[in-house]
């Protein structure tokens, strides 16, 4: 029996999501049980098992909030406030998103520029590549406050330090991907350019660059999520007042677990939206470039 | 066809080592195979030397590899007049592709001199005097057929209208009008190779260098393209240098066949082959055709090509 195409397409995803939610509920009950029991016993009130279970799913500060609590808080903080209110997740998301996008842009440009230098010069490859790899071995959590302090000392505050940290994290996959991409052309294609005595700039624009496009999008997808993480991480140790990172930090100060999870959900939604955007662009470009469907 | 050639088979050349039995049989067949046709007679009556399209003198090329030196070309000399169709034939490693690459300035010889259209190979490349066709079509997959054809024209700075005109003209020449908007993957291998030939011709170079262009195609397509290539050569009057593995292909296409041998890469025989300019595949059954094919085979055997 053939299923409806929509069923065929989405049934596996829906099954997994439902299974995860079920596991989440079970985990929420188990993890919050002692907390709720302690509460009842402290008040010396009689309680039943169903009271207990209901309690695990409606606690104000549970160890693990139940999915409906997280979604409720998420919906409430997205739609319940004006978009520029400090309690609105939209407001915090926009703050983080702007740092992410600026950092992503800077990281992409830096990554491509480094790849170009590496591809065009053996000397630069030898001198730059070890530093590029080293840069990624330093934990960003340790580096971020230093960045903020140093940049603050020269008068840079707010958006820019966060973007720089984000760019610092996300240029790496782009450099690696684009070095591979710029060297992707077939030797025959390079020889052809030589027989036409094409200038280095023409070889770049008409051969290396288009040949690198699939590599560019693969690395952009990795880089855009990394740059979102970079922006959030940059908000944590710097005492930022706004942004998803600030929201996470505030939530953990005051034990607002539901708020933390709602902020995490917002970050996940942002990340998938950003990847979807890159994916959509990639498809458009692929169609323009006649890629075999 | 001014055939200002060095001796057909350089028996006195130090690099040529003929086994005694082969030497006798090959000496007997060394006289250039001449056919009675008018072109031949008229050429003989013109005393003025023709301009040389390619003039190779004592060229050697040695590669340094991990296993030591490899003599890809050893003391090779060859003169090719304007308008000739010259085939290079020999087993793998005999230097026929290297020869073409040296003429194209894709590789530099370690010794000897080389003139292409009377200038150095580098100058000829910088002035875009030749078109090169590789074993594979090497089309740019992100460009449509028309844009692939326009690529060298874009690089060379032709005007937009000129680019359009030429693309249309050369697509028509290889019978691919109507495929302008297709992408390479939508065409068969033979069609793609025709596009790459059109692309090599699009900027109207005097010289066409072809490195086993039909090697990857099946025999039916290959025969068809061979005929088309001959017509094209007849129509355009270009000088063609053509590398091949196939004896019938070499004999069918060429005015001159250069037989090469490996280790070290060298020329062991140069055979004139003067079939009429316009010929059909049927000539492959004629005694003259078979005689030249036989001589190519003898040459290849003399170069120990069959020992490997």
Image (spheres, rainbow, N blue to C red):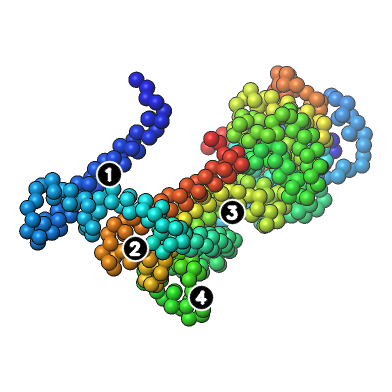
Q: Position of residue B280 (x, y in %)?
A: 75, 21
Q: Callout 1: residue from which chain?
A: A
**Sequence-earlier tag: 1 or 2:** 1
Could you tell me if the residues under marks 1 and 4 are in contact, i.e. CB atoms within 8 Å?
Answer: no
Q: Residue under label 2, please give it.
A: A248
Q: Position of residue A106 (x, y in %)?
A: 53, 63
Helix, strand or loop status at disc 2: helix
The residue nearer to you, when weighing B181 against B40, is B181
The residue nearer to you, when weighing B278 against B295, is B278
Q: Residue under label 4, please give it.
A: A156
Helix, strand or loop status at disc 1: helix
For mark 4, does the 10 Å Cα neighbourhood hold few (<14), some (14 to 19), or many (20 or more) residues? few
**Callouts 2 and 4 in the same chain:** yes
Q: CA distance from mark 1 to mark 3?
A: 63 Å
Look at 46% across and 61% down and name the residue there: A84
Q: Residue under label 1, please give it.
A: A20
Q: CA distance from mark 2 to mark 4?
A: 24 Å
Q: Closer to the observer: label 3 or label 4? A: 4
Q: Position of residue B258 (x, y in %)?
A: 71, 38
Q: Callout 2: residue from which chain?
A: A
Q: Closer to the observer: label 1 or label 3? A: 1
């Amino acid at each position: 029996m053939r299923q409806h195409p929509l069923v065929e397409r989405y049934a596996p995803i829906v099954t997994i999501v439902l299974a995860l939610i079920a596991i989440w509920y079970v985990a929420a009950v188990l993890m919050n049980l002692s907390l709720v029991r302690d509460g009842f016993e402290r008040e010396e009130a009689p309680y039943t098992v169903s009271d207990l279970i209901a309690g695990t799913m409606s606690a104000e500060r549970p160890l693990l909030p139940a999915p409906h609590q997280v979604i409720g808080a998420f919906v409430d903080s997205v739609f319940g406030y004006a978009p520029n209110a400090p309690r609105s997740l939209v407001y915090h998301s926009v703050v983080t998103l702007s740092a992410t996008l600026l950092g992503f842009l800077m990281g992409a440009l830096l990554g491509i520029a480094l790849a170009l230098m590496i591809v065009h010069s053996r000397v630069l490859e030898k001198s730059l590549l070890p530093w590029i790899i080293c840069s990624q071995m330093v934990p960003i959590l340790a580096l971020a406050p230093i960045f903020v302090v140093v940049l603050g000392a020269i008068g840079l505050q707010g958006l820019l330090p966060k973007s720089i940290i984000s760019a610092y994290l996300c240029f790496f996959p782009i450099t690696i991907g684009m070095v591979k991409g710029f060297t992707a052309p077939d030797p025959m294609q390079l020889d052809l350019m030589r027989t036409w005595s094409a200038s280095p700039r023409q070889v770049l624009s008409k051969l290396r660059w288009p040949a690198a496009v699939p590599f560019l999008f693969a690395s952009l997808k990795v880089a855009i999520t990394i740059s979102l993480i970079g922006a959030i991480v940059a908000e944590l140790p710097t005492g930022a007042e706004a942004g998803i990172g600030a929201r996470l930090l505030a939530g953990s100060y005051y034990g607002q677990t539901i708020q933390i999870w709602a902020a995490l959900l917002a970050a996940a939604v942002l990340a998938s939206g950003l990847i979807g955007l890159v994916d959509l662009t990639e498809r458009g470009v692929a169609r323009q470039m006649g890629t075999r469907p | 066809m001014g055939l200002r050639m060095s001796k057909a088979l350089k028996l006195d050349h130090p690099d040529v080592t003929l086994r005694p039995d082969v030497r006798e049989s090959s000496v007997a067949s060394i006289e250039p195979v001449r056919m009675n046709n008018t072109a031949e007679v008229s050429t003989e009556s013109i005393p003025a030397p023709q301009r040389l399209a390619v003039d190779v003198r004592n060229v050697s090329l040695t590669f340094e590899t991990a296993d030591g030196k490899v003599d890809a070309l050893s003391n090779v000399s060859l003169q090719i007049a304007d308008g000739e169709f010259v085939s290079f034939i020999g087993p793998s490693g005999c230097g026929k592709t290297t020869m073409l690459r040296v003429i194209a300035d894709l590789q530099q010889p370690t010794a000897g001199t080389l003139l292409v259209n009377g200038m150095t190979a580098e100058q000829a490349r910088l002035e875009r005097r030749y078109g090169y066709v590789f074993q594979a079509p090497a089309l740019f997959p992100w460009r449509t057929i028309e844009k692939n054809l326009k690529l060298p024209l874009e690089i060379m700075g032709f005007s937009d209208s000129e680019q359009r005109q030429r693309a249309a003209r050369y697509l028509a020449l290889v019978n691919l009008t109507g495929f302008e908007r297709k992408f390479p993957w939508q065409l068969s291998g033979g069609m793609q190779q025709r596009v790459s030939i059109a692309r090599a011709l699009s900027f109207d170079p005097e010289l066409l260098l072809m490195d086993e262009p039909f090697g990857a195609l099946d025999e039916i397509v290959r025969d068809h393209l061979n005929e088309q290539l001959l017509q094209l050569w007849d129509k355009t009057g270009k000088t063609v240098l053509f590398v091949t593995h196939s004896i019938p292909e070499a004999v069918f296409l060429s005015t001159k066949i250069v037989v090469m041998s490996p280790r070290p890469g060298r020329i062991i025989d140069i055979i004139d082959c003067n079939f009429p300019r316009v010929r059909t595949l049927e000539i492959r059954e004629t005694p003259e055709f078979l005689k030249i094919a036989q001589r190519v085979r003898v040459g290849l055997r003399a170069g120990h090509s069959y020992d490997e």
